[in-house]
Amino acid sequence: MSRYETVIGLEVHAQLKTESKIFCSCSTKFGNEPNENVCAICSGMPGVLPVLNEKVAEYAAKMGLATDCVVNLKSVFARKNYFYPDLPKGYQISQFELPICEHGHVDIEVDGVKKRVGLTRIHMEEDAGKNIHSAADNASFVDLNRTGVPLIEIVSEPDMRSAEEAVAYLKELRNVLLYLGICDGNMEEGSFRCDANVSVRPEGQAEFGTRAEIKNLNSFKHIQKVIEYEVGRQIDLVEDGEQVVQETRLYNVDKGTTHSMRSKEEAHDYRYFPDPDLVPLVLDQAWIDAWRAELPELPAAKRQRFMAEYGLADYDAALISAELAVAEYFEAAVKAYAGEPKKVTNWVVGDLLPFCNESGTAPCEVRLSPEKLAGLLKLVDDGTISVKIGKDIFRDLCASGDDPAEYVKAKGLVQMSDSSELEAMVDKVIADNPSEVEAYKGGKTKLMGFFMGQVMRLSKGQANPGVVTKIIQEKLS
């Protein structure tokens, strides 16, 4: 069988974190009762006029600046005409020929290989409503709360060649949005979702194959699986001598398959034309310069700085900088600890992140503050507690927020370092295990771990390992 190359382009919809909708003053709050956040403008009543929310233009431009796009001084809103129950006007206000941002890029890395993914455009648009299907009522309902919520659509070039590259691109894009503070990135609520355009072609062929678009993907895991499935489906069709149909498909999560939704629309199907109710958006260069000056340190730059300033490995720097809250926690802990940054790294990567993942706790909600983590590390460094005890109590501290020193004292966990007390324990272990003592003296030095374990059991884990090791070595030498 001949080999095939995968070609992937992604269209990402990011909901902007504005208080009000793009063309009216209705709230954008998620989770309100159906049709609570609705007015005459976003519900498409006759005779109303939209007014652009200034923050939407600012946020869109900042995303363009953060991804090295050209921010156009003039952009135009257009009507995208199609007919679904969740689109009350019968058209969506979007941008077409003159978007606000064009020609940017996002840099990604997969398995140590760096790659630049081009951005065709970033444009502003309004979201549609939501259809709710009720089996109990044998009916469908429309919730217009989401209608008019501001979006930016980020359209990539077809530069990705694997599901892994697509996921890496989406994660980097989401991180940039979070760092800018313009999108909450909540994939379950649809704040960050994408449509994937997937095609295959024989290796070496310049011409693209026929693509299928898979709509409304809102999970990194699902995106990975759906692309892999779709690539396999298309290769099977080509191998069987059949044609890949250009169409829009949906992903069935339960079955792990895609199925046809409708034939794929082209731009002319939407009959785009400039919206007569909205004048062209004209930006002042001074505004763009001011917005550029407000950009924070972005994920890629933070990764490089962490490696240079704190000596972090590439993997650790990428992991810690992937989420702004984790990066800020790490830096605050490093500052409070004033010791070897690598120790803070090990606890953040090895303990904090697993705690957050397993407990469903956001890093900003962890009650063990960066300063208290630094305090815990200092207790380990000065021998007040062992590393093992520190690890054992870490999750309790994350949940309770107790001061580590007070917690250790209250629980009686202070490490035993009194040599006379520990010597008595070592003597007992040696007396109780004569065969192991004989074997150790005969050259089986790995039995040191056995003796250590016995002493730690007697001390209930509170013996100072360094002191115990020294005593055992002296006794058995």
Image (tube, grey):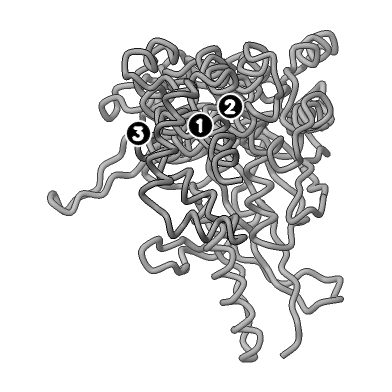
- Residue sitting at 81 percent across and 24 percent down? 309
Q: Which residue is mark 1?
A: 352
| Quadrant (top left, top right, bottom left, bottom right) of the C terminus | top right
- Mark 2 or 1 closer to N-term? 2
- Mark 1 or 3 closer to N-term? 1
- Looking at the rendered image, the disc whose residue lies closer to the viewer, 2 or 3, is 3
Q: Are marks 2 and 1 in contact (CB under 8 Å)?
A: yes
Q: Which residue is mark 2?
A: 326
Q: Is residue 106 above or below residue 435?
A: above
Q: Are marks 2 and 3 in contact (CB under 8 Å)?
A: no
Disc sitting over residue 460 in the figure:
3
- Residue sitting at 68 percent across and 68 percent down? 199
Q: Is residue 122 left or right of residue 263?
A: right
Q: In this orientation, which residue lies closer to the viewer: 309 or 389?
A: 389
Q: In this orientation, which residue lies closer to the viewer: 463 or 307?
A: 463
| Quadrant (top left, top right, bottom left, bottom right) of the N terminus | bottom right
- Marks 2/3: CA distance? 34 Å
Q: Amino acid at mark 1?
A: Leu
- Mark 2 or 3 closer to N-term? 2
Within-10-Å neighbours for mark 2: few <14, some 14–19, many 20+: many
Q: Secondary structure at mark 2?
A: helix
Q: Is residue 260 above or below residue 44?
A: below
Residue 207 visible in the shown view: yes
- Residue sitting at 76 percent across and 28 percent down? 306
The quarter of the picture where residue 100 lies is top right
- Residue 448: % across, % down: 54, 49
- Marks 1/3: CA distance? 25 Å
Q: Amino acid at mark 3?
A: Lys
Q: Amino acid at mark 2?
A: Val
- Looking at the rendered image, the disc whose residue lies closer to the viewer, 1 or 3, is 3
Q: Is residue 127 above or below residue 19?
A: below
The quarter of the picture where residue 209 lies is bottom right
